[in-house]
Amino acid sequence: MKKIALILSAALFSLALASCNNGTNTAGTSAESSESENGPAAGAIVYFNLDRVLEEYDMANDLRSVVETKVNSIQQEINRRGSKLEKDVKAFQDKIDKGLLTRSVAEVQGQKLQEQQNSFQQYAAQKQQEMAEEQQVMLNQIADAIKTWLDEFNAEKKYALIISTQGAVLPAPIATGDPELDITDEILEGLNAAYVKTKAKETK
């Protein structure tokens, strides 16, 4: 979870700057834009807890569950093949130690085992790359969903800046702030509501 938050935080901080540009141009143009009955006023600098969003955003949890299932399956297959190769090597070494193989037979079998080991290493490297790609795609999907929603959200709210913060001991980049400017609950409510609508459309 922390790794995902760290990767997303930089992207979200950058997108927050872009998302909030709409707000800086219109804030203060009317009484309605300078005051808000629901939360901070337009033009305010607000923040949200990225750790909480990643933990409580239904889409993030669903995607993470799917990716974890795929990764676990791949890792189990890697472990299975690795264990088999290890047993084959051990059995071969035992025969060598006991003098049960002629030199020519040992050379042939040893060469085959080396080829199997090379093949396994290539397989493992390929699968590790696939797992990394699965995780990166997941992160991209989560970041894109949050960015898209924040763009639409701030087109209405017109905040000057939306900053993402993370960390329990000393949140960064905001060490402390007015709780009234924390819009995490509102963001989570909006993200999850939008995700419910998306899932409903997909099932039709």
Image (spheres, rainbow, N blue to C red):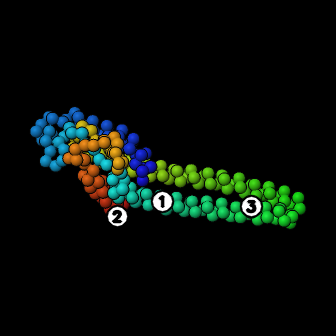
Which amino acid type is shown beneath numbered disc 2? Lys
Task: Name the residue tied to disc 1.
Answer: 68
Q: CA distance from mark 3 to mark 2?
A: 54 Å
In-image side of 100 versus 194 (left or right): right
Which amino acid type is shown beneath numbered disc 3? Val
- Secondary structure at numbered mark 1: helix
Which numbered marker is on residue 89? Answer: 3
The x, y position of residue 184, in whole percent, is: 27, 50
Q: Earlier in the sequence, mark 2 or mark 1?
A: 1
Q: Earlier in the sequence, mark 3 or mark 2?
A: 3
Residue at image location 70% in from the left, 61% down from the top: 86
Classify the position of the C terminus by image quarter: bottom left
- Secondary structure at numbered mark 2: loop
Which numbered marker is on residue 204? Answer: 2
Mark 3: few/some/many CA within 10 Å (<14, 14-19, 20+): some
Give the foreground label among 3 and 2: 3
The answer to whether the residue labelled 2 contacts the one labelled 1, judged by CB atoms less than 8 Å apart, is no
Q: Which quadrant of the structure image shows residue 82?
A: bottom right
- Secondary structure at numbered mark 3: helix
Q: CA distance from mark 1 to mark 3?
A: 31 Å
Give the foreground label among 1 and 3: 3
Which amino acid type is shown beneath numbered disc 1? Glu
